[in-house]
Amino acid sequence: MAIEVRIPTILRTYTGGEKAVTGEGATLAALLDDLEGNHPGIKERLVENKGGGVDLRRFVNVYVNDEDVRFIGGLEAELADGDQVVVLPAVAGG
Amino acid sequence: MLTLDQATYDAIVAHAKRDHPDEACGIVAGPEGSDRPERMIEMVNAAGSPTFYEFDSTELLALYKEMWARDEEPVIVYHSHTATEAYPSRTDIGLASEPGAHYVLVSTREHGNSEGPVEFRSYRIVDGEVTEEEVRVVPELPQSQSRSAS
Ligand SMILES: [Zn+2]
């Protein structure tokens, strides 16, 4: 099961400069664990502990086939072979 | 140093004035690695707020996909402050995620929606460190190297 993950500039320090990497997982949570195995430290930049559980960071956007995962189950969003995942930090401030 | 053309400068200022008292935001894209702010894209401030700005997540993806398709990157990321100086807030610094971009801040606190000068400043924000840089406004961007070589 290969899933392509597009990595934003700010996180390419974890991927040796690669703009995209491949990973595996039946859910987004599983995919992030798989990525963490190959690119230690990256998961911590994407998720945080919230109310006893783990959730995506507020200012990190993850899309599966162009859908914001917040609308399709968040970390429990289901993935299939060939899916395209994009990670983009929010452009935001005060 | 940030070098941008007068038309882009004017368009950023006009956007900031138009959206005052809410914060305005957008980017100016350019060819990857060129440091040329060529194509301005006004974004909607999904927060619709005088103290916060955020690109809508769906529009953010569409914007980046378009840039990737054109081999572009964000050369300038701009937003306005409507009641405070044109200096990155703590939130701006914490959320800055384009280490290669010029972060432009415009303050409309003095004249709001009306005519009149604004503060227009530019910064690099890398790993939480803010470095102000000179802003040079030119009538037109110099010819790009690829064009002058042909
Ligand atoms: Zn700000």
Image (cartoon, coloured by chain):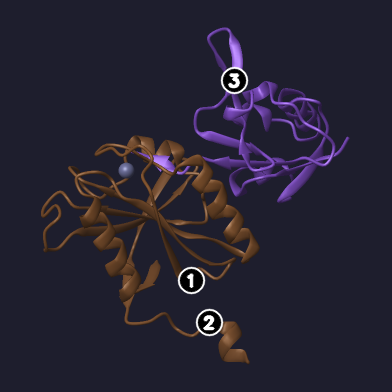
Identify residue for label 2: B144
* Name of the residue lying farthest toward the right: A1
Q: Quadrant of the N terminus of chain B?
A: bottom left
The answer for how far apart the CA atoms under marks 2 and 3 are is 44 Å
Q: Is residue B46 visible?
A: yes
Circle nearer the viewer, 3 or 1 = 3
User: Badge 1: few (under 14), some or many (20 or more) residues near its Cα, within 10 Å?
Assistant: many
Q: Chain of mark 2?
A: B
Q: Please give the chain letter of the residue carrying mark 1.
A: B
For residue A76, the mark is none
Colour brown maps to chain: B
Asked whether, in this view, residue B68 is left or right of residue B122, the answer is right
Tag 3 secondary structure: strand
Taking the spot 27% from the left edge, 69% from the top edge, the residue there is: B10
CA distance separating discs 3 and 1: 37 Å
Give the mark nearer the N terminus: 2 vs 1.
1
Q: Disc 2, disc 1: CB below 8 Å?
A: yes
Residue at point 59%, 45% (across, down): A10
Q: What kind of residue is marked 3?
A: Asp
Residue beneath disc 1: B36
